[in-house]
Each structure stands twice: as C-alpha cells, then as structure tokens.
Image (cartoon, coloured by chain):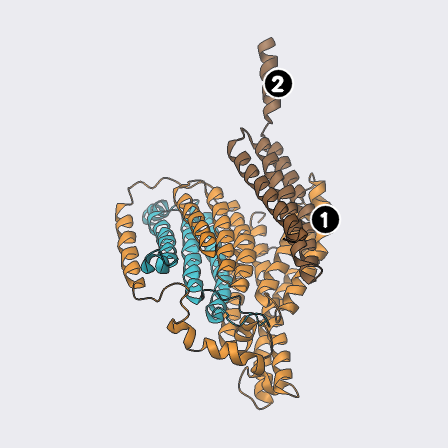
Amino acid sequence: MEITAIITALCLVLGSLLGITGGIGVYRLPDFFTRLHACGITDSACAFLILSGLMFQTGTSLETVKLLFILIFLLITSPTSTHALAKAALNSGETPLMEQQQTQQKREER
Amino acid sequence: MDSIPMNVSGHFNYWVAIFLMMTGFYVVISRGNLIKKLIGLNLFSTSVFILYISLGKIHGATAPIASETFHLYSNPLPHVLILTAIVVGVATTAVGLALTARIYEQYGTIEEDEIRIKDESL
Amino acid sequence: MELFIDITLLTFLCITALAITVIRKLFCAVMLAGIFSLLSACLFVSMDAVDVAFTEAAVGTGIATVLMLAALNLSHSREKCPPYQPLLALLVVCTTGAVLVYGTMDLPAFGDATAPIHHHVAPRYIEQSQQEIGPPNFVTSILASYRGYDTLAETVVIFTAGLSVVALLGIRDRRGGQSITTDRSAMKGYLVLRVVTKLLLPFIFLFALYVQFHGDYGPGGGFQAGVIFASGVIIHSLTLGRDRTLKAFPQRFLTILATAGVLLYGGTGLAAMVRGGNFLDYSVLGATALAGQHLGIFLVELGVGVTVFASMTLMYYAFSYRKEA
C-alpha cells in the first residue's frame, strides 16, 4: 500500500471518529453552550481531517485546489457561525451552566 | 445484493419515497396551520423529486457529465426536469407564504378553523 | 457500499419527516425541513444527480428556509393543537400510500439499465449531444437547448412568482426619511459576523459567477448561480442592514433585471427565428452550428441566472420589509 493511502485512511478514520464524538456530545451534553462546544469539534477538526485526507488522494490537480478552497471557507465560516450562535443565545437570555451553578452557590451561602 | 429477494431491493427506494410523500400529504391534510401545511407540501414535492431521480439511476453508472474514463451515465432527463422543478417549487412556496402573511394581517391568525369562524361571523 | 449509504440516508429522511409531523414549534419544523432538503441533496449525489443536488442544497436549504423564517417572523411561530383526532386523514393517507406501493410493482427495479426510461430519448441525448450541442455536461445541453421551451416557461413562472410576491406584500422604500446609520435591522453587536460577511461576500459572488459560466463543463448553470447570488445579497441584508442592501441593489434595478432576464431568453429565441431557424434553435446564431449553440446556451443561461437572482431577491425584500410597514 502506498504511503498516501495510509495517511488518507488515518485522516478519514480520525475525522470520522471526531465527527461521531461531536454527534454524541450534542446529544449527551447538558446545556446549549457545552453542546455548541461539541458542535465546534465536528465543524473544525473533523472537516479539516476529512478534507485533508481527501487532498492526499487527488494529488496535484484542480480537485486539490477546490478542496483547499472548501477547507479555507470552512475554517472561516464555522467558527463564525459558532460565535454567532453563542452570542445570540446569550442575548436571548440563555445562561451558561457554570454561571448558573455559581449563582446557586452564592444563594446557598447566603 | 443477489441474496436479498429482487423485489425488495429493487423497489426499496420507491417505497421509501412513497412513505415520505405520504408523510407530507398527511401534514397537508391533517394540520390546520397554514405554514405547517406549506412545509408539508414542500416535503411532498421533495419526495416526488427523490422518486424521479431514483427512476433515472442506473447501477454502476456515473454522473451525466462526459468524460473519457466512464461510458455509462445515469439518465440525464429526470435530472433536468427536477432541477427546474426545485426552483419553481421554491418560487411557488414563496407565493404561498406571502398569501399566509397577508391572511395573518387580515385575520390575526393562520389556523384554518379560526379563519373559518371569523369568516362565518362576518 | 452505495446501497449502505442509500439506506442510511433514506432512514434519516424518514426520521426527519416524522419529526416534522410531530413537532409543534414551527421554527423547529422549518429547520427540520432544511435538514430534510440537505439530506435529500446527499441522496441525489449518491444517485448521480449532481446538478439536482447542487440546486436542492442551494434552494431547499438556503432560500426556502430563509423565506419560511421571514414568513414566520410576520406571523405566529407556534402551531395550535388540532381540536379533533385526524384519523380520517390517516386512513386516506394509508390508502393512497397502499395504492401507490401497489403501482410500483409494475415499475422496473431500481438501477435497472434495461428499464424503458433509459431507451427512449436518453441515449440520443447522451450519444449525440456532444456533436450536436457541445457541452460535456449533458444536463446543461438538455436544459438549455433540447428542452429550451420547458426552461423558458419555467423561467417565466419564477418571474411571475416574484412579481406576485411583490404584488401581495409590496416593498416600501423607506430610504427617504431614515439615514443608513440608524438602521435597526443591522446586526450592530455582531462585529465578527459583520467583518466575516464583508470578507466573504466578494468570494460568494465570484463563486456564483463561476457556477454560472462553468455550467457547461461541470454541475452548475443559471438556476444555481442565480440562487447563490441571491443568498449573497440576503446575507448582506441580514448582517449589514436592509437599507444598505437596498442602496446597493435598489428594487427598481432588480425589477428591471428580472424582466431583462426573461427578455434575453425570449430574445435569443426570436434572434434564431430572424436568422432563419426555429424558435430557440441556436444553431443558426453562429458561423457553425456548434458555435451557434455555444452562444445560444450562454445567453439563455445568463437570462435564467439573472431572472432567478432578481426574483429571489425581490421575494426576500418583500418579506423583510413587510414588518416595518
């Protein structure tokens, strides 16, 4: 087996594992912001690994450039969308879990 | 593939498309909310698209763009019909949504039965 | 392997469809409808319909969701419980479904190359279109040339739909009284979003142009390009404020564009008649038949793209300005 095929396989498997982790995270984590964090993993690391894994397969051709563009686009847009979501949630009154716990602790101390 | 009875594996796609179609149909006729009805209608049309594209697929074929390495292409005709249907579908949905917005302004509700009550009281 | 992907996607589609029927929050239902579109786009790719997948991804997930959300913004976002049990509806649906399933028994199996559908006109399109029309993408040559009449009518339908939405909702140009800096619809607090939008907008428009003019060689064409261009304008309006967008793309300009697109399409057909051919027979437009076809398809796709872009943007304007009125 060629070395590029091995690298591609590694990237794809690792990327898919991260994707599954992100999915489980969205399902299992307790509140909006922690779920968003799980989403972020899928958006950035998983997409990055899968796309770069595919890039090893295309060699040097037009497809590689296209994949690179998709990668750059995702690297810009996915953090932005996560940020916008988090900010929108904060603005509409969603409080992070840690803050909730802190206010609860303060209340108990009183 | 061959171990599965031919009938099931061969028609599975159509059946699922029909199931989705019927789900959309059910939403359209059982719900009173006009926007929900439009969503159901969208569901229905997308399932029809899936059925059409399923009919055009050939096993082992590739996308209908001429290339030197492939010689078997899936049927491009359903693709053309559906491609335009999708855009026309969203345009007509937009008209429906505009009508819904106007109905809400006039009646203050988008529930079918409430609209009927208001209509009869006029 | 293909079968496995197929089954997975179909299962997801069924789950999404059932979730849409159950859920009462209309906002969630709209989002699920977007997911449904995206899943069906994936399914289209696995069934070799790349052009269709492209359109579905751009239209179903992008424009349709935005328009639905805009309509929700103008009305209630929660559905009331129906006062009766929809048992009759269920019965009707089950009966219809059973009849349809019975009907599929006569259909040829999925993926069967010997099915009649693959032996009527499709072989001619696949074998001859390279010599007769030119573009390697068969979908483009059928769409713009062989079935040019259909596409003309569909462009007119989109144009009419755009006009109807504007006629129903009306667009009020409020630029007279208000200066741009006090526009409340601009997302002032979202600095990152605004900067990234400004950064990406040129590339979105560039990509739309690429899709428009590369449609002969790969998936793409006027319909997709128009929709992508319109999404660019919608993003601009959502993040930077409606008034700024209205300044960049005035309503009058868009109305003229929508009309110009349809006229360009019809005019190409008429030009062919003037040159002595049939309506929408582009072969007579150039020195050789192939050059004529190339020019004809270029003009027709441009007309489609312009009309789709202008109509979709006008629809969005109509929904988005209604709240203020």
Q: Where is residue A30 in the image (x, y as percent from the top left)?
A: 53, 28
Report the quarter where the N terminus of chain B lies. bottom left
| Residue A2 position (above or below residue A25) | below
Closer to the camera in the image, A95 or B97: A95
Q: The brown chain is which one?
A: A
Check disc 2 and report its element: helix, strand or loop. Answer: helix
Q: Is residue C242 visible?
A: no
Say what amino acid the circle numbered 1 marks: Ile
**Along the horizontal axis of the image, is C230 left or right of B71?**
right
Number of other residues with Cα within 10 Å of mark 2, as a class: few under 14, some 14 to 19, many 20 or more: few
Residue in the image at 41% along x and 61% along y: B51
- Which residue is most to the front? A1
Callouts 1 and 2 close, C-beta under 8 Å: no
Q: Where is residue C189 in the image (x, y as percent from the top left)?
A: 69, 38
Q: Position of residue B114 (x, y in %)?
A: 36, 44
| Closer to the eye: label 1 or 2 | 2
Q: The cyan chain is which one?
A: B
| Residue C305 position (above or below residue C129) | above
Q: Can residue C39 be seen in this view?
A: yes
Closer to the camera in the image, A51 or B37: A51
Residue in the image at 50% along x and 57% along y: B94
Q: How far apart are marks 1 and 2 (CA)?
A: 42 Å
Give the chain letter at badge 2: A
Give the chain letter at badge 1: C
Q: Residue C180 carries which label?
A: 1
Say what amino acid the circle numbered 2 marks: Gln
Tell me what hue chain C is rendered in: orange
Residue where numbered disc 2 is placed: A102
Check disc 1 and report its element: helix, strand or loop. Answer: helix
**Along the horizontal axis of the image, is B85 left or right of C293?**
left
